[in-house]
Image (cartoon, rainbow, N blue to C red):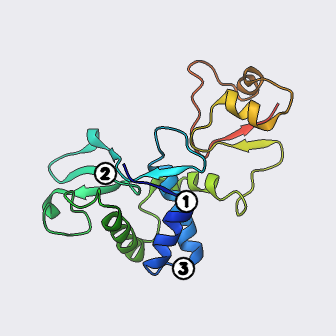
Amino acid sequence: MPQLTQLQVKTRLMDRGLAPRQARIGSAIALCEAPTEVVLDPPCSDFSLIGDQALANDKWGYSYGGFQIRSLREQKGTGGIRDEDQLLKVAFNLDSTVAIFRSQGWWPWSTFRFGQYEAYLQDLFPPPPGTYTVVGGDTLSGIAEKLHAGWTWEDLARVNGLHEPYSIFIGQSLLLP
């Protein structure tokens, strides 16, 4: 199961010709698109992840790898950038990512369009005072423990209007009690 840290993804994107800032944004997108199932420190992107299975149809297949690139049925076995036979290979997934980025920017990734990637670039996008930005693996109790603020996860849930099942997501901004 290939898992890459944000720095490893950034470095590999730069090796493929992306500028440092673009590679950094790309590395944050990968952490949002394919977070590891088990929380790791530092966080990693799971390049063995297969997603979007319910969205597959005659034209589009599953999404693969750290960047969750949606496969295109007509490219199967061709070596095209959306070839499902190749997208689980880390190098191919990264090459395909760079090709897509060069033609469309980061726009095809919803985690870019909706700003979730900013959770992994908090030096560039600091959360407003009195808030916390959720990253992969966070739980309400973990956030309360991490911040040592004297309030409980229940206080955090109450202030944010959260109820069972207390779901939070990467990039979500939480008010602090």
Tag 1: Cα neighbours inside 10 Å, few (<14), some, or many (≥20)? Answer: many
Q: Are marks 1 and 3 in contact (CB under 8 Å)?
A: no
Front-most of 47 and 69? 47
The first of marks 1 and 3 along the sequence is: 1
Front-most of 48 and 163? 48
Q: Residue at x 52, y 62 (%)?
A: 27
- Placement of the C terminus among the 4 image quadrants: top right
Q: Which residue is mark 2?
A: 63
| Quarter residue 125 falls in | bottom right
Residue 175 in the image, given as x and y percentages of width and height: 76, 36
Residue 86 in the image, given as x and y percentages of width and height: 23, 61
The secondary structure type at the circle numbered 3 is loop
Tag 2: Cα neighbours inside 10 Å, few (<14), some, or many (≥20)? Answer: many
Check the image and report above or below for 138 versus 90. above
**Three-letter code, disc 1:** Gln
Question: What's the distance in space between the residues labelled 1 and 3, CA to CA?
Answer: 15 Å
Tag 3: Cα neighbours inside 10 Å, few (<14), some, or many (≥20)? Answer: few
Q: Which residue is mark 1?
A: 6
Residue 164 in the image, given as x and y percentages of width and height: 58, 18
Q: Which residue is mark 3?
A: 19
The secondary structure type at the circle numbered 2 is strand
**Three-letter code, disc 3:** Ala
Q: Is residue 123 left or right of residue 22?
A: right
Question: What's the distance in space between the residues labelled 1 and 2, CA to CA?
Answer: 20 Å
Query: Comparing marks 1 and 3, which lies closer to the viewer?
Result: 1
